[in-house]
Amino acid sequence: LGTGCSGSNPPPGPQPGNQCNADIVFVIDESGSIRDSNVPGQDNYDLLKNFATSVIESNNIRTNVDRGNIKVGALRFSDTSRVEFGLNQYSTASVIVRQIAGFPFTGGNTNITGALRTARTEILNSDRPDSTYPDYVVAISDGYATREQAILEVEANTLKSQGVTIIGVGVTRNINAANLQRVSSGPRNTFTVDDFQQLNNIAASVARAICP
């Protein structure tokens, strides 16, 4: 099968890597505070989207997306949540990355509770209710809940009771660290950075939390 043939090109398609099965939903904060802290020459919302795409482009996740072992969905949230694409819509990492990079910005308040509910009811329970793959929600926000905050932990626990691992990513020092830890699935799945420029420094660690 080509062994011993010098100068042969490697076969096209995904390269070898560890198999990893997962359904991943990215929950992306687009509330007004994201851009309120922009500095000249920097768009925090772009940096937030770049972080999500960097997780997807991490070698083991990208390879397994392209093999069909990982399915990815995404939603944006502020006052309300908007499902951008479900788990069955796109099957290649390059297309998923392009879609996330093109997400528009709405602004508004921070309804993390509603976003987690939408991830559960409109993506995970709707798109692949019988999937045997592990489910992950990667929730990225720069602040604390300003809508439905009284039932945030209830909604997070509902997801966890269904076997969903919530990876909480908090950006800036405005994050309510105690809330983030309660919402996330333990310390291993809780990540914080002081500013948006540091997000890509943790992308590989978030990817390893899904695909060790």
Image (cartoon, rainbow, N blue to C red):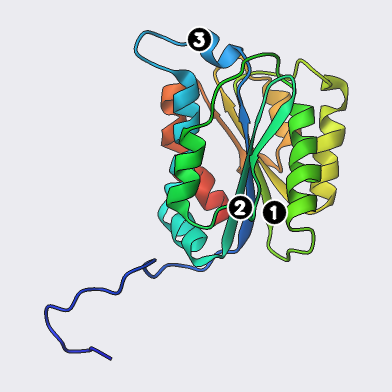
Decide which of tag 3 and tag 2 comes sooner along the chain. Answer: 3
3 left or right, relative to 186: left
The residue that disc 3 covers is: 37
Reply above or below: 19 against 82.
below
* Residue at disc 3, secondary structure: loop
| In-front residue for pair 107/23 | 107
Q: What residue type is labelled 2?
A: Gln
* Crowding near the residue tagged with mark 2, few <14, some 14–19, many ≥20 C-alpha atoms within 10 Å: few
Reply above or below: 110 against 65.
above
User: Total label count?
Assistant: 3
* Disc nearest the viewer among 3 and 2: 2
Q: How far apart are marks 2 and 1 (CA)?
A: 17 Å
7 left or right, relative to 54: left
Q: Where is residue 162 in the image (x, y as percent from the top left)?
A: 82, 52
| In-front residue for pair 210/87 | 87
Pointers 2 and 1 in contact (CB under 8 A)?
Answer: no
Residue 203 seen = no
* Crowding near the residue tagged with mark 1, few <14, some 14–19, many ≥20 C-alpha atoms within 10 Å: many
The residue that disc 2 covers is: 89
102 left or right, relative to 3: right
